[in-house]
Amino acid sequence: MTRVLVINSGSSSLKLQILDTAGEEELAWALVERIGEPTGSLTVRRTAMTGESADERTTEEAFADHTAALGRVLELAGELHVHPTDLGVEAIGHRVVHGGPEFHQPVLVTPEVEADIEKLELLAPLHNPANLRGIRVARELLPGLPHVAVFDTGFFHTLPAAAHTYAIDRETSRRWDLRRYGFHGTSHEFVSRRTAAVLDRPYDELNQIVLHLGNGASASAIAAGRAVDTSMGLTPLEGLVMGTRPGDLDPGLIIHLIRDRGMSPGDVSTLLNRRSGLEGLSGARDFRELLSRVDDNDDDAVLAYDVVIHRLRRYIGGYWAVLGHVDAITFTAGVGENVARLRADALSTMMDWGVQIDAEANENGSGERLISAPDSRVKVLVVPTDEELAIARACDDVLGLGPDA
Ligand code: ADP
């Protein structure tokens, strides 16, 4: 049995889970939000999988920094008997957003690895510093455990040059490693492997399109088990329409805003990271809210939904052309797993290509499942993603802890 603590450290949040990779069970989790603000919130939960009944502690208080936040999590986890020591945690797995050109696989964190992650901060200023903070704080408060970094970009290191190269001056892109890296890789790999398992087909014989649609959203094209294209690029701004990010737009628009409209680079960054996508188009903070406004015939919400669907179709069609042949299309993450209407609308123009949704399975099922009609040439699936489990398993692999090691 391997027990792993998985940490996803954001700039003002910390998400933790303790998992058992053998039973694939979640034993405990914690979420801290609004770190560094006057009032933060914290929840620590013990699940019934520990053998004790489920229990929870929540508190609203100030957490000065990540050290204070993790310290408080450990204190409350101790009260619930789910401190990593109580549960026999053997390793800590960290989500690291940007692995740059070097990191293709999960790695044991050494001082050199840490220095390399730090260097990548220039490519991912919103994410990597927070991820690194998570590693450092965990090492300080939980000494003696090995740390493994699992990179969001890793799965996409197989992208062919034609897919990852920006068509800009070669000197400039080489000098600063400017290329498409892709993100959500842990999810795309997990989901595409589960898709092969559900279809009972060898992973390396399937051509797949995976649509990870959450607050962040990305698509990938996978040919015979290797990622060959993905919608996010140098940063997680490119591609599909997201909760607060626009996805693709004309780079000329950015130049225009800065040069001709007096916006600063910081203003543009805020516009593109926080005031675009669903929120920018309709004011809806998430997809649930968007759908309820669409039902009320709110014009902005209807347009936002249409833009989301239009973009999805362009990506699916584009990836189809890249792959030549598609065996499976899989939806995952909060929106992909829960919004039947979006799945049906995104694929409704593709009947001629051999995509037929089974309306009943699409609307009424739950969990991992096939939602295409029995005679649909292309299989369509819903597969819940589980990045934490994938990270925990990666720790097993890197440290040789797993049952197969
Ligand atoms: P994150 O990128 O933050 O991990 P998630 O994968 O949790 O995001 O997805 C969050 C999105 O999923 C939000 O837009 C939320 O409204 C949407 N969502 C979650 N559950 C549902 C649901 N049952 N119906 C509609 N939308 C949902």
Image (cartoon, helix red, strand yellow):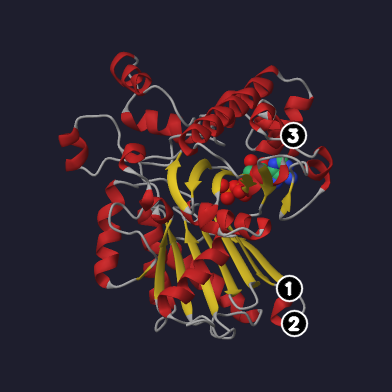
Q: Amino acid at mark 2?
A: Glu
Q: Position of residue 259 (x, y in %)?
A: 28, 17
Could you tell me which residue is drawn at 47 percent across and 78 percent down? 91
The local crowd at label 1, few if under 14, some if 14 to 19, many if 20 or more residues have their Cα within 10 Å, is: few
Identify the residue shown where x is 63% and y is 72%. Answer: 24
Q: Quadrant of residue 113?
A: bottom left
Q: Name the image quarter holding residue 347.
A: top right
Any atom of ligand 1 within 8 Å of the CB at mark 1? no
Q: Position of residue 73 (x, y in %)?
A: 56, 70
Tell me the residue that label 2 is attached to: 52
Neighbourhood count class around disc 2 (C-alpha, 10 Å): few under 14, some 14–19, many 20 upward: few
Decide if residue 333 is in sight here: yes
**Label 1 to label 3: alpha-carbon separation:** 35 Å
Tag 1: amino acid:
Asp
What's the residue type where badge 3 is placed?
A: Arg
Do residues under tags 2 and 1 come within 8 Å of each other at their CB atoms? yes
Residue ID at (66%, 37%)? 287
Quadrant occupied by the N terminus:
bottom right
Q: Position of residue 294 (x, y in %)?
A: 73, 25
In the rendering, at what x and y percent does residue 23 appear?
Answer: 65, 77
Left or right for 186, reference 310: left
Between discs 3 and 2, the one toward the N terminus: 2
The mark closer to the camera, 2 or 1, is: 2
Q: 10 Å neighbourhood of mark 3: few (<14), some, or many (≥20)?
A: few
Residue holding disc 3:
341
Cβ atoms under marks 3 and 2 closer than 8 Å: no
Which secondary structure, mark 2?
loop
Q: Earlier in the sequence, mark 1 or mark 3?
A: 1
Q: Separation of disc 2 and disc 1 at Cα? A: 9 Å
